[in-house]
């Protein structure tokens, strides 16, 4: 089964070349299917397959471009003298490979993801990049994959702009019950209620900070998702000075801002 990825390339020809390789990789598409069999059918978790990674890739790319527009220099540019377009490639690849390890198991899936991604990285980065460039981009993508989980652990904290973005983008896929904090289907608890409370997530240009993330909830229980997952991802991303999160309730008679916390 082939999955369609609608990524806005703009003028980034390298990103387009890489994604053309991704689109025709049957083995990778099969792994995404296996990720969902493991996550949904066997563990009762939410989607960790092609729909999830497509959402994360698009959110990550949007965040990367917004930060670049505000003068933030990507780590691959700062440390290796590469270009902004290469940073976009790192973010997109980190996003689409970050959950591949779910084909093995949930525990330490980020480490398995990095190991499995190696084969696909070499394939999709050829011929767009030279041997040296492929090594650099692979290094950056692997870091973003492994550090997306448990970023509040000092030894696992994202150390690049691109990795910080991948972790945040992953956490933002929480609309309409698509929670990244697993909950058991049919069981009514804070995990399930909070997941189903998130109605809409919008990433937009901010005022106090360059980026505003607006989260609309039907119930205040949705704050659990924000506090438990999104907040630590932002706080430990190295990007907290650029992001303002606003959570708003719509399900009560009187609309009110639950919190305008700057992370």
Image (cartoon, rainbow, N blue to C red):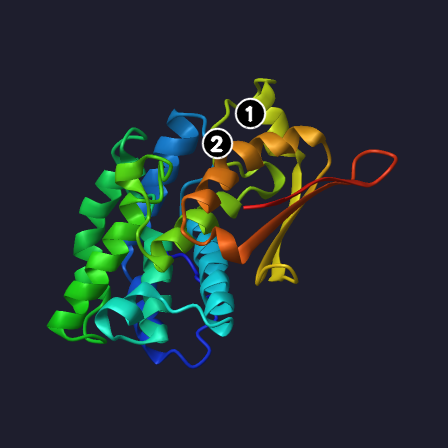
**Horizontal and vertical percent for residue 32?**
34, 46
Would you identify the image quadrant in which residue 41 lies? top left
Q: Which residue lies under the disc numbered 1?
A: 191
> Residue at 23% of width from left, 51% of height from top?
117
Q: Is residue 137 above or below residue 237?
A: below
Q: Which residue lies under the disc numbered 2?
A: 181
Question: Does dot 1 land on a helix, a strand or a loop?
Answer: helix
Query: Left or right: 234 with respect to 163?
Result: right
Query: Left or right: 262 with respect to 170?
Result: right
Question: Does dot 2 land on a helix, a strand or a loop?
Answer: loop
Q: Is residue 169 above or below residue 211?
A: above
Q: Earlier in the sequence, mark 2 or mark 1?
A: 2
**Horizontal and vertical percent for residue 224?**
58, 30
Crowding at label 1, few (<14), some or many (≥20) Cα neighbours within 10 Å? some
Q: Nearer the viewer, residue 30 or 53?
A: 53
Q: How many marks?
A: 2
């Amino acid at each position: 089964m082939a999955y369609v990825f609608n990524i806005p390339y703009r003028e980034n020809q390298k990103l387009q070349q890489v994604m053309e390789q991704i689109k025709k990789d049957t083995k990778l598409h099969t792994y995404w299917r296996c990720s969902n069999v493991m996550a949904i059918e066997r563990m009762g978790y939410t989607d960790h397959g092609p729909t999830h990674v497509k959402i994360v890739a698009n959110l990550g790319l949007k965040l990367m471009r917004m930060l670049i527009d505000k003068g933030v220099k990507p780590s691959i540019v700062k440390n290796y003298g590469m270009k902004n377009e290469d940073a976009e490639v790192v973010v997109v690849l980190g996003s689409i490979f970050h959950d591949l390890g779910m084909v093995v198991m949930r525990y330490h899936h980020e480490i398995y993801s990095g190991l499995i991604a190696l084969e696909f990285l070499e394939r999709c980065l050829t011929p767009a990049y030279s041997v040296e460039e492929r090594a650099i981009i692979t290094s950056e993508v692997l870091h973003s994959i492994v550090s997306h989980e448990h970023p509040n652990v000092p030894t696992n904290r994202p150390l690049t702009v691109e990795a910080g973005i991948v972790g945040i983008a992953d956490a933002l896929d929480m609309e309409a019950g698509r929670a990244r904090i697993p909950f058991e289907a049919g069981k009514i608890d804070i995990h399930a209620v909070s997941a189903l409370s998130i109605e809409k997530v919008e990433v937009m240009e901010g005022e106090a900070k360059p980026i505003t993330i607006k989260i609309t909830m039907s119930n205040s229980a949705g704050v659990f998702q924000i506090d438990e997952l999104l907040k630590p991802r932002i706080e430990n991303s190295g990007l907290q000075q650029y992001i303002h999160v606003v959570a708003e309730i719509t399900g009560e008679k009187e609309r009110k801002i639950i919190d305008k916390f700057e992370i």
